Amino acid sequence: MKSCYLRAAMKLLVTGIAGFIGSHVAERLVGRGDTVVGLDNFDAFYARSMKERNVSSLRGHVEIVDGDIGDRACLDALLQRGGFDAVLHLAALAGVRPSLRAPWRYQLVNVVGTSHVAEAMVAHGVGRLVFASSSSVYGNNTDVPYEESQRVDLPASPYAVSKRACELLLATLCDLFGLSASCLRYFTVYGPRQRPEMAIHKFARSITRDEPVTLFGDGTSSRDYTYIDDIVDGTVAALDRAPNGFSLYNLGGTRPVALAELVVRIGRALAREPRIVHEPMQPGDVLRTWANTARAERDLGYCPRVNMDEGLTRFAEWLQHNAVD
Ligand SMILES: NC(=O)c1ccc[n+]([C@@H]2O[C@H](COP(=O)([O-])OP(=O)(O)OC[C@H]3O[C@@H](n4cnc5c(N)ncnc54)[C@H](O)[C@@H]3O)[C@@H](O)[C@H]2O)c1
């Protein structure tokens, strides 16, 4: 017999809606009938035109407010309208290497901004938060695959510090004010609309233009790459199913790939031969990431489905029609 599961539609605030992950998550939520209000300041980290393109299919279905998570009055004005069931907080300055150029800015935008979001939620009685944390909190931990129970007190970049600080802050605010916050440690996310400075997007652009791909290090560093649809599944599941109180989950693809191998696979997806130039490892970069996702499987039913070759093929198709200038 077919089981009948009726889910009440929710009203949600999505911060960072114009970004890579935020726009995909919002599309999924709108598609299943939730009411979404988006907040984004269209930060200049990459071109506004790309972010406008990210949300083009959402326009008309979603109200998108051009505002800043650092602006408490803006958050108050939104949440005091009432009726919000949860906030998906994805807005941040992302990226490890750029965080070395302005460590203070990453703390200001990410940590202070997250505090504003959580405090506004408490003030307006919104009880559930899903927060985009990062695998970078594991730093150069050699104990792989990474588990949420491991100590994470040696982050390797100001960006990683900001994400770990947000986790600690949210754990404390949950204890103090009865908030429920689920922190999702995303492991290198890729797919259509990936941020232009991220490795797969950058390498694919170079290969398409027949320019050399610059690899930092000897090519043996590895990442656990996660396809965007799997990240959306895990994020929406956290919204629907995470336990009350504070929780932490790894969301990864669970099959790390070495950098040199990644370039070969991107070349295959683009049907081009990559040319490679080696440069020294960059400060702030870590040697490896690798997620143990047992906790997310158990609590959220998370199960990454898209293998890397399939994911890269979908990304390559998208890139053909969406080349960055
Ligand atoms: N992409 C990844 O691989 C990855 C991995 C781990 C964690 N994350 C986290 O996931 C989230 C989304 O990442 P993404 O790759 O989609 O990045 P993104 O840069 O594409 O999206 C972030 C969005 O937040 C907005 N934003 C930045 N500062 C803001 C502010 N002060 N107020 C309002 N909006 C602001 C930006 O304009 C952007 O649209 C971030 O929190 C990021 O740190 C991403």
Image: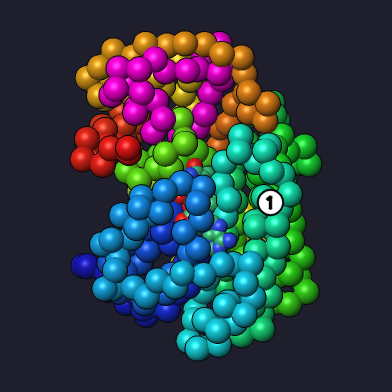
Q: Is mark 1 on a helix, strand or loop?
A: helix
Q: Provide residue 132's location: percent of width, then percent of height.
A: 55, 54
User: Where, by quadrant of the figure, is residue 253 drawn?
Assistant: top left
Instruction: Tally the marks.
Output: 1
Q: How crowded is mark 1: few (under 14 residues within 10 Å), some or many (20 or more)?
A: some
For the point 56% across and 13% down, the residue is 279
Image quadrant in which you'd find residue 96: top right
In the image, the segment drawn in magenta is 200-225
The answer to whether any part of residue 298 appears in the image is no
Q: Name the residue under label 1.
A: 105
**Residue displayed at 39% across by 42% down:** 194
Ligand 1 closer than 8 Å to the CB at disc 1?
Answer: no
Residue 207: percent from left, percent from top:
32, 21
Quadrant into which the N terminus falls: bottom left
Image spot of residue 178 (x, y percent): 70, 76
Which quadrant of the structure image shows residue 60? bottom left
Is residue 90 within the magenta segment? no
Q: Would you say 64 lies left or right of 97 here? A: left
Q: Which of 128 and 30 is in front in this view?
A: 30
